[in-house]
Image (cartoon, coloured by chain):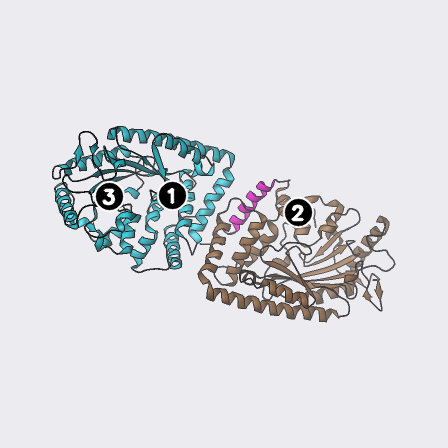
Chain colours: A cyan, B brown
């Protein structure tokens, strides 16, 4: 699989077929693993890292992965690295490193293995909608298969050993990407974020750690993985997310009761601008996307444009635009191309 | 002609058939006249004012006006007065007064006679586009006809005598309503307004004296009428307006050269919002109207929607909305009805 086919494939998790997918974009389960007897990636020699790569690729091939779908970091230019970041396949931290590191993908990017980022392996499965348990069970199966060919660092006391102690134990980070426009509009979101924090979970922006909240999208994940079973982590997070979904639905009902016209006005205007704009920044697009997505969940839009909205969130980001057009672009050029692409996708929507 | 037919008639001057009507909305000539031997309106008894009304209606009937089209101020409720104000037929000052005052209209409001406002008579003709000379010649003919039945106050030294000395002389106020978005966007408008002031002309907002500039619409008129012939006043104003039109066109060319995408983006977004909004204030409507009107003058819009834009400027104002729906409305109700009317008028425009 070459890079071009990555850019032109829509990641499976963007197809909104999962449960509650008008509110929850995706569910992600990630396991951190390291190979016994090899130093952690930040201390290992390039020689050792090379061993990790070949060891992982061999084991993964036996587990059904195609080694041709391994994208080595140093073979990617900056645009391409950004494409992988925008698809949540590699981290900005990995993108900055050279050498024997990269990502192996499978099943239209539902499953991926990040090699030699912070840990030797980061196994990841992303599922559409609110489907954490399936995402975890799937990545757990991949872990089982890989462990036939790789001996992971494991301690009877701590569980799986990882480069950063926050991942000690199960090595599991479960997270969901959730859209909470009503809680933001009613200004209840801060209260929700505080409560979630008190439950040992962490709320971040769209791009994960350290990123701003944009388009009313939030990532919610477990903070530590020690002292609980994987199933407990997943079911704890799921039950909190269930509550948040209920809060969001209540806030939505309140908005429709107290400020129906203003809410509908905001949504329709956003759709009007999406259809009409000739210059559109990523940030503004994400906000318009949020309003129109909210309109979809209110049944204000005729057609199931949810998939379009999901796809555009990835496809109109700077890396994708530059990779598609095959050249470095000035911000204004990107804003024009972004507006063109968005307009084209909404051309049949009547307003 | 009853009030209902006024509300449902589109004033002739809103049909953009006149010269330069994408930039100049309308040209207006107004003559102030008083009847010899009767005190000015602010000092006259109701008995005398009643005499003025019957005297004017008699003379006007001989000049081709239908006395049935006289709308007496005290017969109009507040909505209806606002409708007349919004159509530039009466002034807010007249609207506040009771008794023997009102307006007589003819030719789809192209011609009107305001009776017992500041002066006994204010003869007015409004023409579409940049057509001052015709507007003046027309009102001059009406003046000639009326003078067969009415003896006007006239002094050999000062010319026509008026309640306020600024109107002494010809009693002529010539004015144009002009749309100058490019001069506003390029921030050159202040320089233009200063130059116009130095030429003895005055620049006002959309609603005339004391009103704010809204929707990039400006009224430009002569300041005094003493010491010049009517023809000089009209041709002086016309030549200044010609220059301003040239400045506007140059500013437009510069915008299209320096900021084409941003300019087009602004226009298309405004059209998108006009088509989509569910809640729309008068002020916002006027600004969107301005952007779309600008787009028309740039040939960015497929169809000649200039007439629609002209009509809506009058039809969606608060008085018209309340008169149409026949009831007092809260601002939010008006904003919703305004959005509905506007959306309906642009429903066939593709974006």
Q: Nearer the viewer, residue B124 or B44?
A: B44
* Element under disc 1: loop
Nearer the observer, A224 or A195? A224
Most distant residue in the right direction: B37
- Name the mark on residue B4: 2
Quickly name the residue at label 1.
A303
User: In the displayed structure, would residue B194 be above or below residue A102?
Assistant: below
The reply to whether the magenta stretch includes residue B340 is yes
**Whole-Å distance between the Cαs marked 2 and 1?**
42 Å
User: Which quadrant of the figure contains the C terminus of chain B?
Assistant: bottom left
The subunit carrying tag 2 is B
Q: Chain of mark 3?
A: A
Choose top left, top right, bottom left or bottom right for residue B26. Answer: bottom right
Residue A302 in picture, x, y percent from top left = 40, 42
- Highlighted magenta segment, given as a residue range: B329-351
Residue B305 is covered by the magenta coloring: no
Give the crowd class for mark 2: few <14, some 14-19, many >=20 residues within 10 Å.
Answer: few
In screen coordinates, is B266 left or right of B37?
left
- Mark 3 vs mark 1: which is more N-terminal? 3
Select label 2 or label 3 by which is in front: 3
Q: Secondary structure at mark 2?
A: helix
Can see residue A272?
A: yes
Give residue A118's mark: 3
């Amino acid at each position: 699989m070459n890079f071009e086919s990555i850019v032109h494939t829509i990641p499976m998790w963007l197809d909104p077929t999962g449960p509650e997918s008008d509110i929850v974009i995706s569910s992600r389960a990630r396991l951190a693993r390291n190979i016994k007897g090899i130093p952690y990636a930040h201390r290992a020699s390039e020689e050792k890292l090379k061993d990790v790569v070949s060891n992982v690729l061999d084991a993964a091939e036996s587990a059904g992965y195609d080694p041709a779908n391994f994208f080595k970091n140093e073979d990617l230019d900056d645009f391409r690295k950004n494409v992988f970041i925008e698809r949540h396949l590699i981290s900005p931290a990995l993108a900055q490193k050279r050498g024997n590191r990269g990502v192996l993908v499978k099943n239209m990017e539902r499953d991926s293995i990040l090699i030699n980022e912070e840990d030797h392996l980061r196994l990841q499965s992303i599922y559409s909608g609110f489907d954490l348990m399936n995402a975890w069970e799937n990545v757990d199966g991949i872990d089982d298969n890989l462990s036939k060919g790789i001996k992971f660092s494991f301690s009877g006391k701590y569980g799986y050993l990882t480069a950063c102690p926050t991942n000690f134990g199960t090595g599991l980070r479960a997270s969901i990407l959730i859209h909470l426009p009503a809680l933001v509009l009613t200004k209840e979101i801060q209260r929700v974020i505080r409560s979630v924090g008190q439950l040992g979970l962490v709320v971040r922006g769209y791009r994960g750690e350290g990123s701003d909240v944009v388009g009313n999208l939030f990532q919610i994940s477990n903070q530590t993985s020690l002292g609980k079973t994987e199933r407990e982590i997943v079911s704890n997070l799921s039950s909190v997310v269930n509550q948040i979904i209920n809060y969001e639905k209540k806030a939505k009902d309140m908005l429709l009761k107290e400020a129906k016209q203003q809410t509908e006005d905001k949504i329709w205007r956003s759709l009007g601008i999406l259809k009409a704009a000739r210059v559109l920044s990523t940030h503004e697009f994400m906000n318009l996307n949020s309003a129109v997505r909210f309109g979809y969940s209110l049944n204000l839009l005729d057609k199931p444009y949810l998939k379009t909205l999901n796809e555009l969130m990835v496809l109109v980001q700077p890396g994708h635009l530059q990779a598609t057009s095959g050249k470095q672009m000035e911000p204004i050029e990107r804003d024009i191309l972004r507006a063109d692409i968005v307009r084209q996708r909404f051309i049949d929507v009547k307003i």
